[in-house]
Amino acid sequence: MKFEIKDRDAAGRICNFSTKHGKVTSPNLMPVINPNKMIITPKDMKKLFGTEIVITNSYIIKKDEKLKEIAIKKGVHSLINYDGPIMTDSGTFQTYIYGDIDIDPIEIIEFQRDIGSDIGTILDVFGKPNQTKKEAEKGINETLKRAKKSAEIKCKMNLACTVQGSIYPNLREKCAREISKIDADFFPIGGIVPIMENQRYSDLVRIIISSKKGLDPSKPVHLFGAGHPLIFPLAVALGCDFFDSSAYVKYANDNRLIFPWGTEKLQDISELPCSCPVCSNYEADELKKLDENDRLIQIAKHNLYVSYTELKKIKNAISQGYLWELVERRANSNPYLFHALKLLKLKENKIWLEQFDTSSKNKAFFYTGENSIHRPIIYRVHNRLLERYKPSKNLIVFPEGSKPYSIHYSKEIKEIRKKSNFSIIVDSHLGPVPIELDEMYPFAQSVFPEFTDSETENVVSKLFNDFTKNKNIICWKGFKTIKDLKDLTDKKVDSDILRISAVCEMQFGVGSGSALLNGDIRIIKSEKTGKIRNVYCDRKHVLSMRASDGLFSLKLDGGKILHKKMKKPMLRVVVDKDSASFVKKGKSVFAKFVKECDPGLRPFDECIIVDEKDDFLAVGRCILNRLEMLSFDHGMAVKIREYIK
Ligand code: GUN
Ligand code: ZN
């Protein structure tokens, strides 16, 4: 099994997953194939929707003599006539629907293995939402026991070991932690079908987060039985990689059409609000008049088109860095989902999510409503403002203005600087923004409406109070404010130095700014925009400021300085002996070779690479966080920028 992260946003990720029957990119959807009745064949699915992987049920195959014989003789790929990756389920879901049915947990693994399944699933014990904690615990113990035994006989088949634990977060996390110790390749989160059916999305969020907390981050996670695209964006943002859909047929059987915002009955639809090939071909009335089987096929196709399109939107949102925005927009279309998203404002959830979110995005932060202020990136910069930015004891506070603030308020700043070196702060929609940070992501790269909402205002005003505690605040009331300034200082403020230092502290930590600026400083600016581009200290190129996000790329000489100044393990990724020689040739650092990592480093953060003796080797950009670097066996951990030759 090979699974590696290619791109990421929120706690979501775009990954490559390799199987014997080909590569799959995630997030992805596995349509459920009923070998007894294929509404659309897997081959056609591949043609129509670009299907990369399907799921079928080994229990259904095994209990039907004819299917069983073909599967044993020719394999499951031949049985359903599909040469791509196939996952098989075990019959757990049938035990949930029909009660006690006779399935042997070992035999069903052997069967899946022998028919050539690419990913076989253990016979986990379905944890129902109405179980007591004790019952759920008993189910988990049995599931873990079966998982261990199954792993011993899986041979070359990838094994999916399901996380259970009903609605109890502690049990979910415990089960996830235990099951991660087993030699498994794939982790479904199970027992959620009844939760989905009753739109209990808050429970769903609690289940996903607690399971993810315990799971090995280097393995694919599958949300079992959640086939409605409404929840795809949120589930992906919380770290789910795979979905399966029987919903496409189930809903079609019921004449119901799936949309990204929910489900609608064909009989209620006057105009088809969709432009998939089916909806482009038929009017709503024509669809209603089709004979039953044709209609079933057309609706099933529409349902799959919509589901796959939502996944494409999600992947696009990940690569452009606006997954949270997509999640919020979807939550705005369903009150249960909206309520579930509120859970992400709990501190414990913010702390967990913050570890995975990238330090910068390709696209600006777009406000969509009261949930936006709770995004992990805001939590991070708010914390860093309090911990890493040191304002002077006097603050001049400006109201929100157009961006960048230093241009908008340039005249005012010039006049203030003649008289004082007070800290100049903009009371912005996302919190207090020191003027010297006004080009940094997300302060500059954010778009808010003129008026926000009370929730946002509360979060921001609480931060403002913490930020200005024990400070003397002067609110800007026009140029007359300057007259009253008493702190006539002869110490001149260099706004470029102030900016470089403040961005460094926010990005690399307290003490980094003064270290990098300790010498004879030369600043190169863009001729076109006048913005800082390169920073030299004692003729050495230490930093480059990126125009896109106002953050620094760390140059080799800057890395050397930070390596000296910042104590272990700060900013460091430690590689093993063998890997050090590759780093010296400029090769990327692969996760497999990482021995340790600063727990404070986040994806896309700048870092320094050292060997096990803490000798400096290179500077680069993290792709993974510490947890991931230490558990992934495949893929890049750090992209090297410059290295010691
Ligand atoms: N299909 C839907 N839910 C589940 C589950 O919890 N376990 C298994 N094995 N299959 C499922
Ligand atoms: Zn359609």
Image (spheres, rainbow, N blue to C red):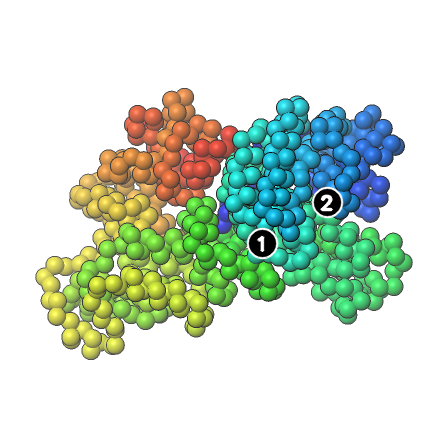
* Of the image marks 2 and 1, the number of the one nearer the N terminus: 2
Quadrant position of residue 38 = top right
Give the label, 2 or 1, closer to the camera.
2
Q: Amino acid at mark 1?
A: Asp
Left or right: residue 575 compared with residue 46: left
Left or right? Give the position of 594 relative to 406: right
Mark 2 and ligand 1: say if the CB distance to the nearest ligand atom is below 8 Å.
yes
Q: Quadrant of residue 567?
A: top left
Q: Which mark is residue 450?
A: none
Label of residue 203 in the image: 1
Q: Position of residue 412 (x, y in %)?
A: 24, 70
Q: Position of residue 53 (x, y in %)?
A: 69, 39
Q: Is residue 587 left or right of residue 299?
A: left
Q: Quadrant of the N terminus?
A: top right
Instruction: Kindly check if marks 2 and 1 are in contact, taking CB atoms under 8 A apart as contact.
Output: no
The residue under the point 59% across, 31% down is 184
Report if residue 76 is visible in the image.
Answer: yes
Q: Residue at x 28, y 49 (%)?
A: 505
> Which SS class for mark 2?
helix
**Which of 38/271 is in front?**
38
Nearer to us in this view, 552 or 355? 355
Task: Provide the residue designation for mark 2.
Answer: 96
Instruction: Sort mark 1 into few (<14), some (14-19) or many (20+) by Cα contacts within 10 Å.
Output: many
Amino acid at dot 2: Tyr
Q: Which residue sits furthest top? A: 578
**Can residue 215 be seen here?**
no
Front-most of residues 267 and 96: 96
Q: Position of residue 306 (x, y in %)?
A: 69, 55
Density class for disc 2 (Cα within 10 Å; few <14, some 14-19, many ≥20) is some
Question: What's the CA distance linking mark 2 and mark 1?
Answer: 19 Å
